[in-house]
Image (spheres, helix red, strand yellow):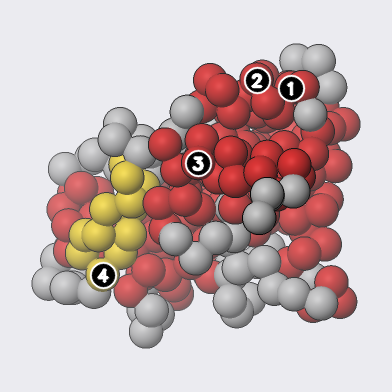
Amino acid sequence: MRRHPRAARRAVVRDLVDRRDLTQLLSLMRDDAGTVNWILALAFDLDDRVRWRAIEALGVWARATAAGDLEKIRTVIRRVLWLMNDESGGIAWHGPEIIAEMLAAAPALMDEYARIVASFIGQSPFEAGTAWAIARLAEVAPEAFADSIDELTRSTRSSDSMVRGYGLLALSMIGASEARRLATSLLSDSGEVVVFERTSGVPVKTAVAALARRVLERETSIT
């Protein structure tokens, strides 16, 4: 049976995301707005590698688009926020990470959306993703997240190791005075955290304790 052209195109996009061919993906996104939507769908994929590489690709697109048409990026961000709302009929668990990656690439939109993203820090199921998002955006504008410090401090006591690890990284990236004390308290925490390594493009499993050591050694970049 011959594959429908639309399905075939979608399969090509997934393959390019999986292979991390960012050059070809950017070319397709520039030529066809539908490609952006397909990559956005992959940013919610159950496969960690596909999901993170799709998120990365959306950031590459946002960086290339920011100088010419911020409204295109706003449209995608609004769609993700809608998908994060219960009324959309589905819960976009990884919405904060997607938005943060695009905002980091298009900082002109930080004032519009950074605080909205940070507001999800205490809301299930977005706690881990929002902590990661704050850490990512704090690389660009740490001062924008001073109001999140108390909530992030509480997150380091979460029963979810991903929330604890990302919360600690976010505090460190913000430059919160509590970060080093909390890092010391987490040096024996063997809970698992997945970190996307941008050099290799691979999500890597590590421990909260390893992230705590990074904070104490001042190696705190989320990227």
Give the labeled residue for mark 4: 192
Residue 74: quarter of image: top right
Furthest residue in direction front, as rendered: 1
Residue type highlighted by circle 3:
Asp
Residue type highlighted by circle 2:
Ser
Q: Nearer the viewer, residue 166 or 15?
A: 15
Decide: few, some or many residues near mark 1? Use Cα within 10 Å; few <14, some 14-19, many ≥20: some
Residue 162 is situated, as x and y percent measured from the top left of the image, at 37, 68
Q: Nearer the viewer, residue 150 or 94?
A: 94
- Element marked by disc 1: helix
Q: Which mark is residue 30?
A: 1
Residue type highlighted by circle 1:
Arg
Q: Is residue 208 left or right of residue 139?
A: left
Q: Which mark is residue 122?
A: none
Give the labeled residue for mark 2: 27
Q: Determine the CA span between mark 3 and mark 1.
A: 18 Å
For the C terminus, give its image quadrant. Answer: top left
